[in-house]
Image (cartoon, helix red, strand yellow):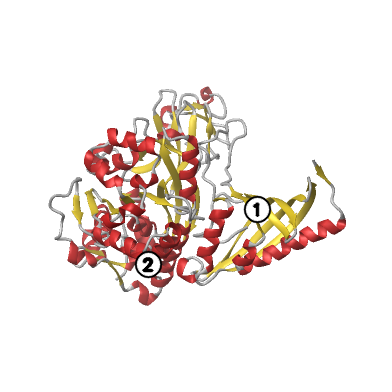
């Protein structure tokens, strides 16, 4: 099979085989597919750009990527979040070349054009009267995204003026986002600037892994978990094979790994969250959400297309108890076989300062570029790229066929919204991320 | 209370840093562990591009490493066995290059050592080497068992890590 720009909907039927629960390996390596994704997925979907807590005050800004496009997320004088394309409307130079800061606006370093926090053009190189009225300057503001909105502190933007409202886009996933991000009156705050690193892998490998890949967690992370927390491997395996995976709709998917009942006495409730926070969760969340959180081992999810998060716990002191951490990340596509991973940690705003630090340490030591878990994941994804990029490798499929056994086994009385399956191993939800991708690529 | 050191002290500390570099390249972690002090603080922050006037701090930080001796023992243990690391199985090929060493005495038996470190690394899954460099500020203590690293603060000169893992030490 050869991919070309005239690829139509039928060709994407072949690239992702819903019936057979397989996909062509080309989707992880092909240059044409990568280019089509920029238009069909990343210019259409809602993309995560930042957190409310990063831009609290008027003039606060952070620079981000929306796939291959640089953007600035600002807090405008109107108090609203704005997402501006970070390229001058004059000749295209980057107008803001800082990671973060506070400013009244942005001055292009090339010709000195000046833009406000909402992207409006304030000044050109010379007085605008020099143009003798021949130019309509109202068309020369910085390009803005069509929409910006936030949910549970998470700010998303889209270039697509026909996109559904963010609430409808997230749909049932909001119930799960509430469980992880919206469980105290103050909500969450970002712990620090993002870590960024490059994996030699297609962006979908990260999105799928967090959507989520249960079986890898035993092979790749099992021995580390056993060594760090001091729990038996049987706990990890039983947790993953006995806990639900959830398809939340619109391509949003995840797993909820629970500590099996017989191991409850070996685990802190609520992942070792601060007791004062647990009291707030109990008041702020519903009983079903509290039930999931109370003996959670890991909650891992992907909001289509490239935003993922994990709520889990880890211990790096054999004598101490594990401490919870909340991680969010974005899989930014760079090329078919390169992804820039952006990684942050969050903590409940009301948590005591010393707990915030403990949670940060628990997080960076496990789910960051230096973390024991991410080191191993990134290496596995990079090895996939190496494994499938040859002539023979390209002709094969990637396999999600555990889904064949599980896709009809929805849990009938599942306490949360969406369709749930009885094992983290099901591969149904991971494959569901690709089915959503297929819908976008057919459009 | 920083003060100058003798030629002999400088040579001893430089030799300590060179020997340490070899241990880190070879991933001889049990041996390296014996050179770490019980009150170790090992910190590698994420560098930022900022406007000096408009700079602001977001949260408490999100460093690559912020380790004490307890977490370091666990990390080194995980990286020492092929069953508990995918990233370092097989081990990366590495060369730690130490240079620009400057030493000041800091109180009784302690030294502030500033040096530059460049790590040239190749992984099995990508044969193209990557290099990462930083400026280190160490606090090193003289003990009966030899020198021990008490503090290490590394300022990296790159904002994005160009490889999938930092599964090694600076």
Tag on residue A167? none
Q: Which residue is mark 1?
A: B134
Q: Nearer the viewer, residue A261 or B166?
A: A261
The residue tagged with tag 1: helix, strand or loop?
strand
Q: Which residue is mark 2?
A: A219
The residue tagged with tag 2: helix, strand or loop?
helix
Residue at far front of view = A265
Any part of residue A87 in sight: no
Provide residue A76's location: percent of width, then percent of height. Answer: 44, 27
Q: Could you tell me which residue is drawn at 31 percent across and 69 percent down? A: A2
Residue A344, picture quadrant: top left
Separation of marks 1 and 2 at Cα, in angstroms: 34 Å
Residue at far bottom of view = A392
Provide residue A100's location: percent of width, then percent of height. Answer: 52, 37
Q: Nearer the viewer, residue A300 or A263?
A: A263
Provide residue A205's location: percent of width, then percent of height. Answer: 37, 60
Count of marks placed on residues = 2
Provide residue B40's location: percent of width, then percent of height. Answer: 63, 51
A68 with respect to A215 (left or right): right
Residue B8, picture quadrant: bottom right
Q: Chain of mark 1?
A: B
């Amino acid at each position: 099979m050869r991919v070309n720009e005239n690829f139509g909907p039928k060709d994407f039927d072949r690239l992702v085989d819903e019936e057979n629960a397989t996909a062509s390996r080309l989707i992880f390596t092909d240059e044409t597919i990568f280019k089509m994704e920029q238009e069909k997925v990343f210019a259409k979907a809602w993309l995560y750009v930042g957190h409310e807590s990063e831009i609290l005050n008027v003039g606060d800004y952070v620079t981000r990527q929306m796939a291959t496009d640089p953007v600035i997320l600002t807090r405008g004088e109107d108090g609203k979040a704005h997402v501006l394309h970070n390229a001058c409307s004059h000749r295209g130079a980057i107008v803001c070349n800082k990671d973060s800061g506070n400013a009244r606006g942005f001055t292009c370093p090339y010709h000195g054009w000046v833009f406000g926090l909402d992207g409006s053009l304030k000044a050109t190189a010379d007085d605008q009267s020099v143009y003798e009225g021949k130019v309509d300057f109202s068309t020369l503001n910085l390009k803005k995204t069509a929409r910006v909105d936030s949910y549970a502190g998470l700010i998303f933007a889209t270039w697509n003026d026909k996109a559904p409202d963010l609430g409808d886009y997230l749909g049932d996933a909001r119930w799960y986002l509430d469980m992880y991000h919206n469980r105290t009156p103050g909500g969450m705050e970002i712990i620090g600037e993002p870590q960024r690193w490059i994996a030699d892998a297609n962006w979908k490998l990260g999105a799928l892994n967090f959507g989520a890949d249960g079986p890898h967690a035993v092979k790749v992370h099992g021995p580390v978990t056993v060594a760090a927390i001091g729990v038996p491997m049987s706990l990890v395996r039983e947790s993953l094979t006995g806990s639900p995976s959830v398809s939340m709709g619109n391509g949003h998917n995840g797993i909820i790994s629970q500590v099996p009942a017989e191991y409850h006495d070996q685990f802190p409730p609520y992942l070792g969250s601060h007791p004062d926070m647990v009291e707030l969760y109990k008041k702020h969340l519903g009983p079903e959400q509290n039930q999931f959180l109370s003996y959670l081992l890991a909650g891992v999810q992907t909001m289509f297309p490239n935003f993922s998060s994990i709520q889990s716990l880890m211990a790096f002191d054999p004598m101490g108890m594990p401490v919870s951490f909340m991680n969010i990340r974005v899989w930014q596509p760079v090329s078919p076989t390169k992804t820039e991973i952006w990684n942050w940690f969050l903590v409940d705003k009301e948590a005591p300062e010393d707990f915030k630090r403990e949670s940060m340490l628990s997080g960076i030591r496990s789910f960051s570029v230096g973390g024991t878990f991410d080191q191993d994941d990134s290496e596995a994804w990079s090895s996939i790229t190496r494994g499938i990029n040859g002539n023979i490798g390209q002709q094969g499929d990637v396999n999600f066929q555990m889904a064949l056994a599980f896709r009809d086994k929805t849990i009938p009385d599942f306490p949360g919204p969406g369709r749930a399956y009885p094992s983290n191993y099901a591969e149904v939800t991971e494959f569901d991320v690709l089915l959503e991708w297929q819908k976008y690529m057919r459009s | 209370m920083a003060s100058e050191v003798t030629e002999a002290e400088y040579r001893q500390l430089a030799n300590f840093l060179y020997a340490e570099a070899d241990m880190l390249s070879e991933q001889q972690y049990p041996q390296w562990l014996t050179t770490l002090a019980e009150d170790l603080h090992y910190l590698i922050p994420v560098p930022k591009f900022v406007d000096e006037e408009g700079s602001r701090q977001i949260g408490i930080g999100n460093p690559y490493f912020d380790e004490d001796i307890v977490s370091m023992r666990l990390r080194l243990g995980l990286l020492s066995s092929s069953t508990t690391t995918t990233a370092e199985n097989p081990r990366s090929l590495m060369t730690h290059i130490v240079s620009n060493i400057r030493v000041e005495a800091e109180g009784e038996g302690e030294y502030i050592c500033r040096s530059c470190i460049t790590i040239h690394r190749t992984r099995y899954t990508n044969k193209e080497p990557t290099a990462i460099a930083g400026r280190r500020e160490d606090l090193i203590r003289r003990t009966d068992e030899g020198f021990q690293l008490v503090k290490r603060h590394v300022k990296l000169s790159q904002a994005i890590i160009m490889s999938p893992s930092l599964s090694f030490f600076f």
